[in-house]
């Protein structure tokens, strides 16, 4: 069965610091990879996704992620965070198990100090 | 942008009671899902639904849970006899999924279920 692990549960950064959130998954077959974000009091929403092609994908608000197949990783990065990036970030994997089930990681809470 | 809507936003119930959580997926979407998030824990997959039947379900989705699409717009999750550990935020989601794996999920704002 597939699983997703996120390395950090809580991250605290100052504005303008660089961000990297780790994500590793386990599944032997074809997967699509996602990062979702949940701002305080709001829905889960898609930040970026990878399904094929260039392993470096760019998403909204200056976020990017790199798929490294050999490491089963899909780390999220942003060169300079802002206070408004304070949110919880979820890595997710969708595998072809027949029902398009998406498995989420435990989430990383990011707090950006102004 | 079109939205997935969920009602109610907060449901309080007594242990052993039945609850029905309601969702209106985005109108042209074909796949529907329920997820839940117990406070402080990860978002967990419960069930996916396509073409009027369950496509996949997790081990959490036992006999006390059921889903239904009673008409062309609503998608419901029923919990027959609630337990304390069912207290969680329940998210409905939908996706187009017309071309395979690369469809993103659109989530509703969730229903906070509190079982007393």
Image (cartoon, grey):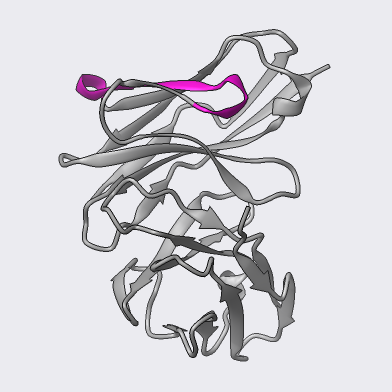
Residue ID at (43%, 22%): A65
Check the image and report above or below for A39 versus A13: below
- Residue A31 in the image, given as x and y percentages of width and height: 25, 41
Identify the magenta region. Answer: A59-71
Residue at image position (28%, 71%) is B55
- In reply to whether residue B14 is colored magenta, the answer given is no
The quadrant in which the C terminus of chain A is found is top right
Q: Quadrant of residue B114?
A: bottom right
Residue drawn at (77%, 22%) of the image: A83
In this view, the residue in front, B11 or A52, is A52
> Which residue sits furthest left?
A28
Rendering coords of residue B43 (x, y %): 51, 53
Say left or right for B21 vs B102: right
Which picture quadrant has residue B115? bottom right
Q: Position of residue B101 (x, y in %)?
A: 28, 49
| Residue lying at 53% horizontally and 62% vertically, measured from the top left | B36
Residue sitting nearer the eye, B41 or B22:
B22
- Confirm whether the magenta stretch covers residue A64: yes
Image side of residue B111 versus residue B83, left or right: right
| Relative image position of residue B7 (x, y in whole percent) | 68, 75
């Amino acid at each position: 069965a597939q699983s997703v692990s996120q390395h950090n549960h809580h991250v605290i950064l100052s504005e303008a610091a660089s961000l990297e959130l780790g994500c590793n998954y386990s599944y032997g077959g074809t997967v699509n990879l996602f990062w979702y974000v949940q701002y305080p009091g709001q829905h889960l929403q898609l930040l970026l996704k990878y399904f094929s092609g260039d392993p470096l994908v760019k998403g909204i608000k200056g976020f990017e992620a790199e798929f490294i197949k050999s490491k089963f990783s899909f780390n999220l990065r942003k060169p300079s965070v802002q206070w408004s990036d304070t949110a919880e970030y979820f890595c997710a994997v969708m595998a072809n198990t027949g029902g398009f089930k998406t498995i989420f990681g435990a989430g990383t809470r990011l707090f950006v100090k102004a | 942008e079109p939205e997935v809507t969920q009602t109610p936003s907060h449901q309080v119930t007594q242990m052993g009671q039945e609850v029905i959580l309601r969702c209106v997926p985005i109108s042209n979407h074909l796949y529907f899902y329920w997820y839940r998030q117990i406070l402080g824990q990860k978002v967990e997959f419960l069930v996916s639904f396509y073409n009027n039947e369950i496509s996949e379900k997790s081990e959490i989705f036992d006999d006390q849970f059921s889903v239904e699409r009673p008409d062309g717009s609503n998608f419901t999750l029923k919990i027959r006899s609630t337990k304390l550990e069912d207290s969680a935020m329940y998210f409905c989601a939908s996706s187009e999924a017309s071309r395979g794996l690369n469809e993103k999920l659109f989530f509703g704002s969730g229903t906070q279920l509190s079982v007393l």
